[in-house]
Image (spheres, rainbow, N blue to C red):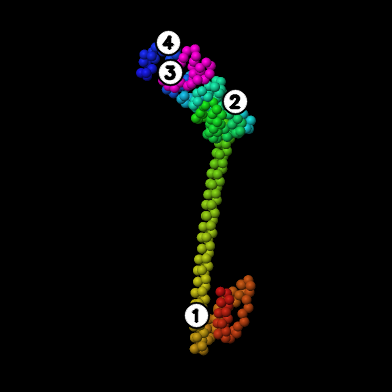
Amino acid sequence: MEALLSLPALVLIALLGSGSVKVTSGGRSRLVERLGKYDRELQPGLSIVIPVVERVVSHESLKERVLDIPPQLCITRDNVSIEVDAVVYWQLLEHSQAYYAVDNLQAAMVNLVLTQIRAEMGKLDLDQTFTTRSEVNELLLKELDEATDPWGVKVTRVEMRDINPSPGVKQAMEAQMTAEREKRAAILRSEGEKEAQLNEARGRAEALVLDARAQKEAILLEAEAQAKQQGVMAEAKSQAALVLAKALAESPEAEEAVRLMLAEDWMAMGQRMADSPAGSVLMVDPQSPASLLTALRQFQQGKD
């Protein structure tokens, strides 16, 4: 700086005029042509441009910039009209390349972005445009970065901000969402009713099982009690018959008394035999008490 402001430099500036002095800020770039041909790029700081012979043809920022893409009408793969707008973040890397490669860089980038958006939206169904937005942003970034590379431009980020279907499509989507919510509610209600019915039926079945089990146990207990009672009675009668038979064997004089006692049992047994549905026939010697006892025992055992 001190060298530029030395006396020879001041004399040169005075001879060339103040218009020949250019101060370039940091993060910016100037392109200089000499006699209509690209000569050099001015770096940040103080630079001298020779009047008439040289001129600055472009002055651009090298910082990251935002390119706002206006809403664009697109047609999806399932023939639905949607309106899409986006924002593109980009940076100028090669100033001279961008200036001489394309006329009106930003307009060219806008047209390129719109073309890429229409192409990508045409590959997707309406539902996919909402669910795959991140994937579409990544794909657009890759394609735009490759397409703008010859222009000396670096695309750093692409974001689709809004995807708006037409009013008719919006109404249809809202109706579909309402129908889906009602369907889910109906399914939940039916599942709840089904579960309640199952619980009620399960409760009734368990009650029936418990009742049947209780009845079965009661019947088994009653049968067991009857069996034990009959066994005790049979054993008692058998013991009594044995005692009586022994008494008759030891005391013949008691035979007449026993015969009278057995006659009563004989008559009762005959009455039971007569009342029996199947009927029974018992052959005995009425003059023999022992025969009567044996017959009574056999009849009682057959009945048991």
Who comes first in sequence, dot 2 or dot 1? 2
Q: CA distance from mark 2 to mark 3?
A: 47 Å
Residue 297 visible at all: yes
Label 1 sits on residue: 239
Q: Residue at x 57, y 74 (%)?
A: 303
Q: Cα distance, mark 1 to mark 4?
A: 159 Å
Residue, disc 2? 73
Position of residue 211 measured from the top left corner of the image (x, y, whole percent): 52, 58
Disc 4 residue type (three-letter): Leu
Q: Which residues are magenta?
A: 31-58
Question: Label 4: how many residues lie within 10 Å, few (<14), some (14-19) or many (20+)?
Answer: few
| Residue 99, x across and y down, in percent | 53, 21
Which amino acid type is marked by label 3? Ser
- Circle 3 is placed at which residue position? 47
Q: Residue at x 52, y 73 (%)?
A: 230
Tell me: residue 139, above or below residue 96.
below
**For numbered disc 4, what is the local secondary structure?**
helix
Callout 3: few (<14), some (14-19), or many (20+) C-alpha neighbours within 10 Å?
Answer: some
Which is more N-terminal, label 4 or label 3? 4
Residue at horizontal 51 percent and vertical 18 percent from the top: 33
- Would you say the residues marked 3 and 4 are in contact, meaning their CB atoms lie under 8 Å apart? no
Q: Nearer the viewer, mark 2 or mark 3?
A: 3
List x then y, in percent, for residue 134.
Answer: 52, 34
- CA gap, disc 2 and disc 1: 114 Å
Q: CA distance from mark 4 to mark 2?
A: 58 Å
- Rounded to the nearest angstrom, the CA distance separating label 3 from label 4 is 15 Å
